[in-house]
Image: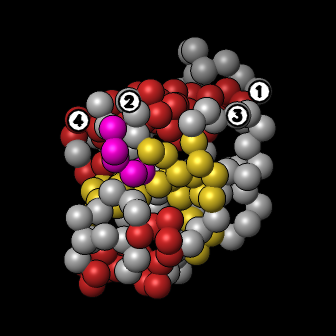
Amino acid sequence: MLTGLHIVFLGGDARHLEIIRSFTDLDANVVVIGYEDLHEQLLEVQHSKLTREVLRNADVLILPVVGTDDHGRVESSFSSETLLLNKEYMSSLPKHAKVCTGIAKSYLRNLCVELGIDLIELFSRDDVAIYNSIPTAEGALLMAIQHTDITIHGSCCMVLGLGR
């Protein structure tokens, strides 16, 4: 159970929706930021704008797979607003808070180090990255099918990657 845990989702895409539902099922207090254009209802979830007050109460801040860009912008599939995670907002997080993302660029990594905030990069963990390679390979096949006029079976092709 996650009773009493305050989890803030800042940005994200459809993959986050299932995680949000799981956290609410486990009784966490969930706040979502950047979900105002979502066309389905998330039960037991608080929608908010990005404010220092919301982050002040967070035990965990969950960012999209890529975290932020090199200037602190956070992507959201469910918002037309620009979400900017800067030092002012990050300094609002309690010292015990964790920031979770798939991978972090230097902007986010440096900000967390400077502020003494724990950063968890999930794709640096083998148990996550190895399982993520399966949908990644399926996505590569989908793109090949969508962008060619031939069948893949019997064709001469190679898939190369640097991941696990």
Whether residue 96 appears in this view of the structure is yes
Secondary structure of residue under mark 3: loop
Q: Which residue is mark 1?
A: 149
Marks 3/1 in contact by CB < 8 Å: the verdict is: no
Percent of width and height locating residue 33:
60, 57
Residue 103 tag number: none
Tally of marks: 4
Residue 127: assigned label: 4
**Residues drawn in magenta:** 3-7
Mark with earlier residue (3, 1): 3
Which of labels 1 and 4 is toward the front?
4
Q: Please, which residue is most extreme toward the front here?
A: 4
What SS does tag 1 mark? loop
Predominant secondary structure, magenta span: loop
Q: Is residue 73 visible?
A: no
**Residue named by callout 3:** 41
x, y percent for residue 72: 51, 76
